[in-house]
Image (cartoon, rainbow, N blue to C red):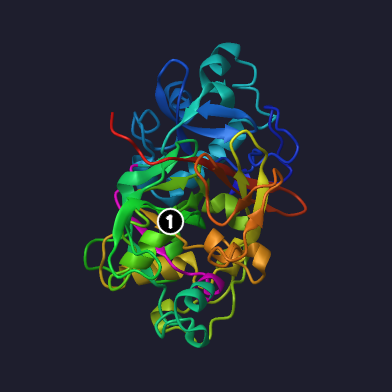
Amino acid sequence: MPITANNPKRKSWLEVPENSDFPIQNIPFGVFLTKDDVITIGTRIGDFAIDLGALQQLNYFEGIELTDDMFMQDTLNDFISDGKKTWRLVRNRIAEIFDVKSQQLQNNAEHREIVVFKMEDVEMQLPVLIGDYTDFYSSKEHATNVGKMFRDPENALLPNWLHIPVGYHGRSSTIVPSGIPVHRPMGQTLPNGETSPVFGPSRLIDFELETAFITTDANVMGENIPVHEAEDYIFGMVLLNDWSARDIQKWEYVPLGPFLAKNFASSISPWIVTMDALEPFRTKGPKQDPTPLPYLQQKGKHTYDINLEVAICPENGEENIVSKTNFKYMYWSMCQQLAHHTSNGCRVNSGDMMGSGTISGPTPDSFGSMLELTWGGKNPIKLTDGTERKFINDNDTVILKGFCQNNEVRIGFGEVASKLLPPFVRS
């Protein structure tokens, strides 16, 4: 079935600002709360949120097999469970409805009133009920930098890294959408030169520039997903700031890896950009040497040219861009990650989220964390207000943005912006 929604010549009757992340060729999916306190599944074109629940009730999806309440829910899980054919049919239909040549909704003021909202009048929610969250560690540049800092610079990568997409199981209960502030966590750390740990606020809060992909129901327990089929089970992508407490991490990560240093908060962008929308931006990833084992081998273009950036905005200050990088630098692809994740028969469900791991490029200005950008705090970043940052200060807002662009169209993710607050105090 062709992806007619991607036609780069298509124009919408809704106004789309120049360089918008959300032209009619994007059609991402999310969940929002209207000013009437109604939660609905929606999409976005330009600066307008579109109520898909209202569209369904008004029979705009006639001819597509959907349960009666498919878009009148507070998560996308059921829609994602319906699979790739339904995703594509719905996205193609939305593109037709909002095409400048389409008159049905465009000329019906009564319907437009209950379908189309200004973005400023809605409140974005977490788009899926995330049952499980896995975070990978798939940037060779990032893993090498961390290995140099924490271990032997001559043997920065551990022996398994070039053979498997290394990952760990995260915590879904503290994944929040853009705009929800995050508290500086308390925890155990080992001060320099000491032999006994102390308990208190983390002093080294960091961002991690990541993306994440959302899965559909992929398998039954015991079944593996072949790498060449994995794409069929990936619904779309979001931006992910996987907050990290580096001092807590340093003390706890041996022998079992990340725990409290990571699970206190993870922030995601609220719109899920579908893999169909990203199709025009496929590209080849880095050469893998040594050649992976057969179950991880891929040919062709299996990554995406996604421009990424991070900014730090002090309270009452302006945004300071501190990193620019690209998703295409990732050593292990999303398909390889999903194939490896299920290679032992681990079940993957609709709404599960898989983090890419920190995305760092080859140059110092393309590193994806403060740990790397300041090299463990040794080289502070100077902001435009004259202050310096080794890590993230209380009341700083961290903003991640991402977009793809070619000669015909720009497809973006919007942003994930989160403010770091002081430690939570019980009243």
Is 173 left, or right, of 113 in this rendering? left
Viewer-proximal residue among 174 and 41: 174
- The percent position of residue 388, horizontal first and vertical second, equals 63, 52
Q: Residue at x 32, y 35 (%)?
A: 425
Q: Is residue 389 magenta?
A: no
- The percent position of residue 274, horizontal first and vertical second, equals 52, 49
Q: Is residue 426 above or below residue 105?
A: below
Quadrant of the frame with the C terminus: top left
Viewer-proximal residue among 317 and 60: 317
What residue sits right under mark 1 in the picture? 244
- Which three-letter amino acid code belongs to the residue tagged 1? Ser
Q: Is residue 335 above or below residue 275?
A: below
Q: Residue furthest top?
A: 110
Question: Would residue 348 be seen by someone viewing this image from the given angle?
Answer: no
Question: Would residue 55 be seen by someone viewing this image from the given angle?
Answer: yes
Q: Please state the extent of the stretch shown in magenta in the rendering.
A: 129-144
Q: Secondary structure at mark 1?
A: strand
Q: Is residue 132 magenta?
A: yes
Viewer-proximal residue among 410 and 244: 244
Is 138 left, or right, of 255 in this rendering? right
Disc 1 packing (10 Å; few <14; some 14–19; many ≥20): many
Q: Residue furthest front?
A: 193
